[in-house]
């Protein structure tokens, strides 16, 4: 671990945010400006007494949007699936969300991220490799194709529509109990700050992640709310309830990915690896590194070799991107 931390420090000095990177402080004690937590922050602390619900969300095309229920998720992961499309895995904890979806199928590398919080894993079908790993690792899964019409429902009447399946936190919890899964005993997927923290770094007012020519994701910082408003193809990312999604914190994780090599368009994502990334919050961008020793071990993020602590207020988005992705982080104009 010491070697990893030393390597992390060296890599950080080479990894910068924005067009005109500033010099990164070399002492970890200089990284933060701490303030007393607000009452709202205290109330929003995540206890993880219960296991989160991790739900696979369709994001293949405009037909999958507007999404339902994402405004209630505390943590959302987004990464590639085949065809240059992305899929979102949304985590819900202690919420009463009446409609979530559209629910879509599993990919094997999402399982590693769900494992970070010991989440109950909801999906609608699977790739062959996800099916293999759900059995191999004993994942407590909730398959919408098996429970279509009971714990999941269709907004349209025919089962062949990929964008039509929905569920709720209540139904998923009921299904988990029916299947004999333990609903207590979640774990924190990230290290959450016990006080309000702003990391020093370069200005980060706009983030552009061009996942595909048909799908450009971006965030714009609102200094009044201190949130990053989320846009898809230059339009606000809103839900069926009319909520405009916005992030308190954004983690960009750069990870190796490549064609799986089985003759299909499926991809392999190297989750058990080390790499670089960015942490963006409160108008600032800081370089980070990450490591996961093996697939079933926890993903850890570091800033200058010390564990990254993320705000427990608001939503956190983890955007997983390949090394070839041209992420642009614009400084304040």
Image: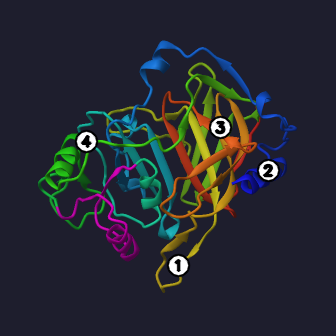
Q: Which x, y percent locates residue 108?
A: 43, 67
Q: Earlier in the sequence, mark 2 or mark 4?
A: 2
Of helix, strand and loop, which one carries label 4? Answer: helix
The residue at 69%/62% (across/down) is 323
Q: Earlier in the sequence, mark 1 or mark 2?
A: 2
Residue for badge 3: 280
Of helix, strand and loop, which one carries label 1? Answer: loop
Dot label at residue 169: 4
Does 121 appear in magenta?
yes
How far apart, in angstroms, are the residues tagged by discs 4 and 3?
29 Å
How far apart, in angstroms, are the residues tagged by discs 3 and 1?
31 Å
Of helix, strand and loop, which one carries label 3? Answer: strand
Q: Which residues are magenta?
A: 118-146
Q: Which x, y percent locates residue 154?
A: 19, 54
Q: Earlier in the sequence, mark 1 or mark 4?
A: 4
Of helix, strand and loop, which one carries label 2? Answer: loop
């Amino acid at each position: 671990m010491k070697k990893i931390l030393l390597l992390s420090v060296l890599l950080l000095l080479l990894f910068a945010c924005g067009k005109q990177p500033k010099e990164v402080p070399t002492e970890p004690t200089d990284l933060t400006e701490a303030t007393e937590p607000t009452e709202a922050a205290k109330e929003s602390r995540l206890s993880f007494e219960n296991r989160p619900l991790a739900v696979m969300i369709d994001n293949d095309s405009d037909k999958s949007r507007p999404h339902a229920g994402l405004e209630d998720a505390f943590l959302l992961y987004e990464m590639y699936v085949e065809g240059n499309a992305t899929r979102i895995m949304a985590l819900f904890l202690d919420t009463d969300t009446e409609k979530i979806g559209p629910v879509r199928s599993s990919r094997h590398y999402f399982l590693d991220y769900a494992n970070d919080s010991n989440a109950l894993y909801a999906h609608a079908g699977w790739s062959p490799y996800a099916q293999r790993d759900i059995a191999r690792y004993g994942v407590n899964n909730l398959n919408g194709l098996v429970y279509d019409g009971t714990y999941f429902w269709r907004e349209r009447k025919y089962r062949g529509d990929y964008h039509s399946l929905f569920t709720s936190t209540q139904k998923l919890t009921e299904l988990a109990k029916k299947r004999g899964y333990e609903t207590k005993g979640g774990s924190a997927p990230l290290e959450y700050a016990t006080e309000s923290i702003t990391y020093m770094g370069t200005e980060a007012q706009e983030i552009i992640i061009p996942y595909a020519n048909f799908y450009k994701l971006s965030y714009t910082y609102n200094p009044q709310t201190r949130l990053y408003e989320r846009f898809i193809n230059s339009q606000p990312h809103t839900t069926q309830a009319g909520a405009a999604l916005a992030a308190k914190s954004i983690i960009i994780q750069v990870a190796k990915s490549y064609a799986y090599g089985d003759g299909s368009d499926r991809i392999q994502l190297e989750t058990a690896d080390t790499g670089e990334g960015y942490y963006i919050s409160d108008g600032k961008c800081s370089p980070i590194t990450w490591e996961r020793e093996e697939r079933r071990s926890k993903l850890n993020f570091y800033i200058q070799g010390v564990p990254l602590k993320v705000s427990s207020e608001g939503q956190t988005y983890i955007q997983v991107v390949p090394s070839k992705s041209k992420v642009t982080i614009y400084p304040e104009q």
